Image (cartoon, coloured by chain):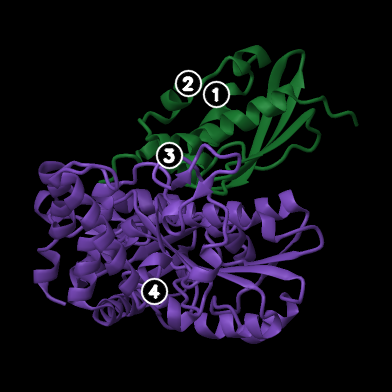
């Protein structure tokens, strides 16, 4: 990948020295996504689904075009796509709307890999409904083993929620195999995939995965903040209770029992973040233009090189977490004698942006027996120069803290 | 040169004072920063309302550990009431730096641990 990709990201004009290695938290935005957001406010600025004037009609039409485009992007049909705020909201929606599917004595299964957004909703649902919450461990390389699901999933298991990619370890799960294994044990199980770290960095295909639900965030795939997608299989989505009620999702509000619109509109009460949705379309366009395969291999190549350099430079004093070989742009590590927060702070003072802490994944860190880790996540706009700067910055940290 | 990691912070994080445990503490407490996993424990020896001796033990970033070290020196030999009066500004003055809200939590863990120990029940041997 050459500099022409990096040039698509205006932030590097304002901050030419920026080494952005925190795409796992949020990805930078290409010019087209930024322009789509400001273009909406500048040229349209109307609400969706209501007005009979030109800007309103155009806004509504474009909004639904994005749904079609987003559906194709994740291998789904438009009526299976709900616009949410982010992955967290998508999963909270499911927690609320699936509540009537679980009763005392049932089981909900999650994994030790999960980000809090795909852990806490299920923990709360389990507590509320008196169901048992089981946690599937990950293997030594940070992946979930389809063959070991039988130890956790049984006939009483109603929901199985897991992430396609670990936001800490960068391990990539075989989603298709996991869902097949879960359904083989219990055909009625509802499967939920957290695709937040996968979308925009590798192929996401709801049809191929055969998941019942899938949630992702637009901002992690070069789109604006404030928009996410929830995919749900039509047959299931249509039977769910709405998460929020209000405008834009109702057919009859005056009868004793309100009549709601069909999915996906029944899950989209209130005015959505229209600008963000239009920005997401541009982000999808960007990803499709470069190609998920090309992005994925670029990220793997950089992370692999970074891992090699880290090991060569710091030897036994660095511990790289997760898989033996890089499976995407994420690389988390700990260093002897330097707390991850201090590493991130020293790098931050040099405009090198990494993340330190638990990365919203306490259960995972507990499982690994470490309080925190440092995470560098590479993406489409990163270059080998960024690796040089990372290594130099880390050398600086080691020098600063050596006793 | 790093702006946050001034000599005093580096010195106290590399060579923390009053580190470890007391043989016969009269007060003990533990606190944890849930968001980053930093943890501290405090042992105090209090006689006639005076903090005669203090030890911190724990794990965490340079800021949290240096802050504990600096605080231990500041309160040793001081009245309990004076230690209870200490606030965020006092900790920042000890560290001699300004901190972002994220790192402030690291710096304040020591004070939280100390105050917890001061307000906890006396250990009866």
Examine the rendering and report whether any part of residue A338 can be seen: no
Name the residue nearer the viewer: A244 or B108: A244
Which residue is pictured at 38% across the width and 69% down the height?
A330
Q: Secondary structure at mark 1?
A: helix
To which residue does mark 2 refer?
Answer: B90
Mark 1 — on which chain does it sit?
B
**Chain in green (letter):** B
Name the residue nearer the viewer: A187 or A170: A187
Q: Secondary structure at mark 4?
A: loop
Q: Secondary structure at mark 2?
A: helix
Tint of chain A: purple
Q: Residues within 10 Å of mark 2 (few under 14, many from 20)?
A: some
To which residue does mark 1 refer?
Answer: B74
Dots 1, 3 in contact, CB < 8 A? no
In the picture shown, does residue A11 fall above or below B13? Answer: below
In the picture shown, does residue A68 fall above or below A149? Answer: above
Judged by depth in the image, the label closer to the viewer, 2 or 4, is 4
Q: CA distance from mark 3 to mark 2?
A: 18 Å
Q: CA distance from mark 2 to mark 1?
A: 10 Å
Q: CA distance from mark 1 to mark 3?
A: 24 Å
Name the residue nearer the viewer: A68 or A133: A68
Q: Residues within 10 Å of mark 1 (few under 14, many from 20)?
A: some
Dots 2, 1 in contact, CB < 8 A? yes
The circle on residue B102 is 3
In the picture shown, does residue A162 fall above or below A208? Answer: above
Q: Quadrant of residue A379?
A: bottom left
User: How far from the left and from the top, in percent, is residue A139?
Assistant: 60, 79
């Amino acid at each position: 990948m050459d500099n022409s990709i990096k040039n698509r990201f205006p932030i590097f004009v304002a901050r030419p020295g920026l080494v952005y290695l925190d795409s796992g938290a949020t990805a930078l935005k290409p010019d087209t996504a930024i322009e789509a957001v400001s273009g909406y406010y500048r040229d349209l600025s109307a609400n969706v689904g209501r007005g009979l004037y030109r800007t309103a009609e155009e806004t509504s039409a474009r909004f639904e075009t994005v749904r079609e485009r987003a559906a194709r992007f994740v291998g789904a049909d438009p009526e299976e796509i709900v616009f949410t705020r982010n992955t967290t909201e998508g999963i909270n929606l499911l927690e609320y709307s699936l509540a009537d599917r679980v009763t005392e004595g049932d089981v909900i299964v999650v994994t030790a890999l999960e980000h809090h957004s795909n852990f806490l909703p299920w923990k709360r649902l389990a507590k509320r409904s008196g169901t048992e919450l089981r946690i599937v461990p990950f293997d030594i390389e940070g992946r979930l083993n389809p063959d070991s699901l039988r130890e956790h999933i049984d006939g009483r298991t109603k929901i199985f929620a897991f992430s396609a990619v670990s936001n800490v370890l960068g391990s990539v799960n075989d989603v298709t195999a996991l869902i097949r294994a879960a359904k083989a044990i219990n055909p009625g199980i509802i499967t939920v995939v957290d695709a937040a770290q996968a979308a925009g960095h590798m192929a996401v295909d709801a049809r191929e995965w055969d998941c019942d639900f899938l949630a992702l965030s637009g901002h992690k795939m070069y789109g604006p903040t404030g928009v996410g997608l929830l995919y749900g299989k039509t047959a299931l989505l249509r039977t769910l209770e709405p998460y929020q009620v209000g405008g834009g999702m109702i057919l009859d509000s005056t009868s004793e029992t309100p009549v709601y619109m069909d999915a996906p509109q029944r899950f989209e009460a209130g005015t959505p973040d229209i600008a963000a949705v239009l920005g997401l379309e541009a982000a999808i366009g960007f990803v499709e233009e470069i190609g998920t395969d090309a992005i994925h291999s670029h990220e793997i190549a950089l992370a692999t090189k970074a891992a090699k350099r880290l090991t060569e430079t710091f030897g036994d004093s660095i511990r790289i977490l997760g898989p033996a070989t890089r499976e995407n742009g994420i690389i988390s590590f700990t260093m002897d004698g330097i707390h991850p927060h201090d590493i991130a702070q020293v790098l931050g003072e040099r405009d090198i942006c990494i993340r330190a802490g638990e990365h919203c994944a306490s259960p995972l860190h507990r499982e690994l027996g470490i309080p925190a880790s440092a995470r560098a996540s590479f993406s489409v706009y990163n270059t080998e120069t960024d690796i040089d700067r990372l290594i130099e910055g880390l050398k600086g940290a080691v020098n600063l803290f050596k006793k | 040169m790093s702006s946050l990691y001034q000599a005093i912070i580096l010195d106290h994080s590399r060579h923390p004072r009053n580190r470890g445990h007391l043989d016969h503490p009269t007060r003990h407490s533990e606190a944890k920063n849930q968001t980053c996993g930093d943890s501290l424990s405090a042992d105090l020896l209090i006689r006639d309302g005076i903090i005669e001796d203090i030890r911190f033990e724990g794990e965490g970033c340079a800021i949290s550990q240096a802050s504990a070290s600096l605080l231990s020196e500041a309160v040793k030999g001081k009245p309990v009431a004076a230690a209870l009066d200490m606030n965020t500004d006092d900790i920042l003055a000890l560290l001699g730096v300004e901190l972002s809200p994220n790192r402030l939590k690291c710096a304040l863990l020591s004070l939280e641990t100390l105050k917890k120990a001061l307000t906890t029940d006396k250990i009866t041997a």
